[in-house]
Amino acid sequence: MISAKELASLLELFKDDDKPLEAVSASFHKAFARSEHFRLACAMCAMLVDGLLAAPAHRLIAYFLLRDMYSAEPLAAQPFLPFLVEQLGRERDGSNAQVEHNLLCLLLAEPPHKDVPKRSALEIRASLAAGEPLPAPNLRAVQVAFAERDQHIPALRRKGIHATVRAPAAEGEGDAETLADAARDSKLDALSARELSCSSFEPAFARPPPPLLGAGEDEVLWLSPCAEGTMLLWDHSMCTDNVKSSEVRELMSKAFKGPLVPQQQQQVLSELESDAKLVYHCGLTPKRLPDLVENNPVIAIEVLLKLMSSSQITDYFSVLVNMDISLHSMEVVNRLTTAVDLPTEFVHLYISNCISSCESIKDKYMQNRLVRLPGGFPPV
């Protein structure tokens, strides 16, 4: 919070207990920049709560500085006003209890007592100790102002136990007051070597983690393997150039434009046979099927057989039915009907189209050839 050097300078100010409080406040503002006031005020609060200020006059100076430091600000903007209100309501014992109570009453009065800044801490202690306890001022305005501010702060955050625990007074010779003063002096000397802290232990609020929702049928389940020896398996073939796939795509692009030589045709068929998934990456689409059927019917037959389990096979059948009837297209359909069970409606529609095409052909030789092929279709 503050360094040992800052703490030493602050304690040096407290020794001016024979000077007017306004003079002590002026020395405080001269010694410390405004940006440092909040940290120093937090340190004074910690020393007041932990009993680290031995002399009663020093405690009075600390109370006055806490009130005077932000007195020009509105009530809700004075950060240490709730601390002073809390100290006023705290039960005290000892010879300085009445003095502190009366001083806090004068400081928290609206407006604050005008004679307090003009008198020294020793004079105030002497005068307030001789008089009667003063009635507590009306703090309704202060409480309302800070209630509006604190409503945005969680209740548990405002309830904390101070982190500093007082050590019991050491047993030995001497009266209780002397031992208490010696204990405070020793704690303050030890404190000079490190920073003060206003941290507190907040009450723990149990928040059990909510159970995980079960994954739905349409959701992806996140797997978190925790068994020992679990290791990732990498597919080193990913993102690598497949030479065979490139060659097949190149040959297929030629097959759409014209017949392949037997050696090229055999290479395509061998690659399709060795890799069942290659048919999905060879560049064939339903739109390009008629070109493949007319130029390379053998490859078309093999490709269609590989695509029988595909969800796009219906699109290929539709193109095959509606394309122009030729010897090659009829040969492809004939081979398909003998190899697999084709949908009945597809076969009926294709035969119907064949009959219509044959009736429109005037060349008797070609007509006879086209008629023989549908006649060889297996019965459906």
Image (spheres, rainbow, N blue to C red):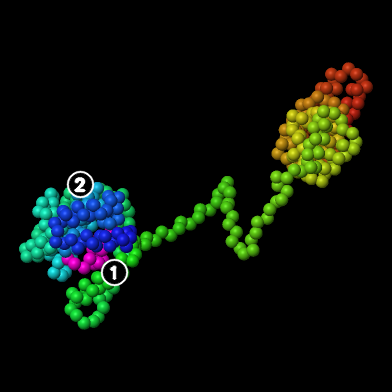
Amino acid carrying mark 2 in the image: Ala
Amino acid carrying mark 1 in the image: Asp
Q: Residue furthest top?
A: 362
Q: Position of residue 199 (x, y in %)?
A: 33, 61
Residue located beneath label 1 in the image: 189
Q: Position of residue 195 (x, y in %)?
A: 33, 62
Residue at 88% of width from left, 26% of height from top?
370
Residue at 58% of width from left, 49% of height from top?
220
Tag 2's secondary structure? Answer: loop
Quadrant where the N terminus sits is: bottom left
Residue at 59% of width from left, 55% of height from top?
223
Q: Is residue 2 magenta?
A: no
User: Picture quarter containing residue 262?
Assistant: top right
In the image, is residue 142 above or below residue 366? below
Q: Position of residue 10 (x, y in %)?
A: 25, 60
Disc 1 to disc 2, C-alpha distance: 34 Å
Which labelled disc corresponds to residue 337?
none
Q: Nearer the viewer, residue 118 or 236?
A: 118
Which labelled disc corresponds to residue 72?
2
Q: Which residues are magenta?
A: 42-56
Cβ–Cβ under 8 Å for marks 1 and 2: no
47 on left or right of 310: left
